[in-house]
Image: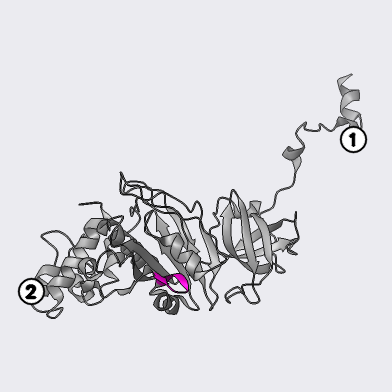
Amino acid sequence: MPAERSRRRWDEDDVRVRPNPRGSRPRTKERPVHADAVPAVVVAVDRGRCTCLLLEAPGALPAAGAPRVTAMRARELGRTGVVVGDRVGLVGDVSGQPDTLARIVRLEERRTVLRRTADDTDPVERVVVANADLLVVVAAVADPEPRSRLVDRCLVAAYAAGMTPLLCLTKTDLRPSREVLGAWAPLGLDTVSTHREQTPEGLRIAGLDALRERLADRVSVLVGHSGVGKSTLVNALVPTAERATGRVNDVTGRGRHTSTSSSALPLPGGGWVVDTPGIRSFGLAHVRPEQVLLAFPDLEPGAAGCPRGCTHDEPECALDAWVAGAGAGPAGQVRLGSFRRLLRARTGEGED
């Protein structure tokens, strides 16, 4: 009997089929290149759905009237997150018709990345916006009182992201702007002052034209804590925005969140502005001292003599001796003080 069994010819009935069909699926590491993917830019993200504007060319700014396409991240992107400002490649239905959905299959390299963490010990970075040129830090001179440490943190984030910072002071009719500008004067920041005023034609924002000039033909991000008038500025810059506005709490002196998500809006004169939700903290656990030093090119040569791993805010730092020797000119001590103030804001020292 064993001899007969060994001489029997095998057929398909002898093949054991696995009950799990995926267990026998052929695997490959090759991925489609999607050469026909349509270039687009993400202007809003809501619960996994991305609103994208189609681009005429990959490196161009989107036109205000460009077709809007709803898309979702393709599985092949893995855990890669998509944020406002990302330049992507779309496949599928890109007609923009209702109830259609495209797929984001490619994420272009980000030119600039504005990041934040939940606090100064959180290792998880959260990307706020990508590929922006200008970070507009909005702060009120009063009602609510300016939080200088939070402004400093936003400036540090701008320097680390490779973005140009702009300080926009609001409600300057309640208090002269010069009373709060002294803390940032040594940084050489570009500043704009605005306030609301009543005219025969109606309510308008004084200083808005100066702000428009700086935002023209650029991608700008507005950040600031709640109640500083950020959404009011956006509505004035983009009349069709209709962003919700609120008021400052009389008891706490703090504003209330009105914007709940980031959104990119086209400026009538060219360019885009990204309105972000109001922030109460801006964690900078991801920022290194060297990244802040890049914003102080006049101090960089003095750091060459620092010990390895120098925090630039310790007794062994070589910047003190270098500045004392007139290495950075007459303003060296003031600039060094401003630099170290930003470093301390990065670690949360003296947070207000």
Kind of residue at badge 1: Glu
Query: In the image, which is nearer the foreground, mark 1 or mark 2?
Result: 2
- The image quadrant where one finds the N terminus is top right
Q: Which residue bears the numbered disc 2?
A: 324
- Residue 147: x percent and y percent? 27, 56
Which one is nearer the viewer's eye here, 147 or 38?
147
Task: Answer few, some or many: residues within 10 Å of disc 1's Cα (few below 14, many 20 plus, some between 14 and 19).
Answer: few
Kind of residue at badge 2: Ala
Q: Earlier in the sequence, mark 1 or mark 2?
A: 1
Give me the residue at 74% from left, 47% from top: 26
Relative side of 52 to 122, left or right: right
Which one is nearer the viewer's eye here, 209 or 349?
209
Q: Determine whether 335 is above or below 151 in the image.
A: below
Q: Determine whether 213 is above or below 165 in the image.
A: below
User: Quadrant location of residue 136?
Assistant: bottom left
- Circles 1, 2 touching at the beta carbon (< 8 Å): no
Please state the extent of the stretch shown in magenta in the rendering. Answer: 198-205
- Residue 331: x percent and y percent? 14, 77
Q: Principal SS element in the magenta part?
A: strand
Residue 202 is covered by the magenta coloring: yes
User: Quadrant location of residue 286?
Assistant: bottom left
Q: Which residue bears the numbered disc 1?
A: 12
Task: Answer few, some or many: residues within 10 Å of disc 2's Cα (few below 14, many 20 plus, some between 14 and 19).
Answer: few
Q: CA distance from mark 1 to mark 2?
A: 88 Å
Secondary structure at badge 2 equals: helix
Give me the residue at 22% from left, 57% from top: 344
Question: Taking the image as drawn, is residue 288 in sight?
Answer: no
Give me the residue at 20% from left, 61% from top: 341
- Residue 69: x percent and y percent? 68, 62
* Display coloring: one colour
- Residue 84: x percent and y percent? 53, 61
Secondary structure at badge 1 equals: helix
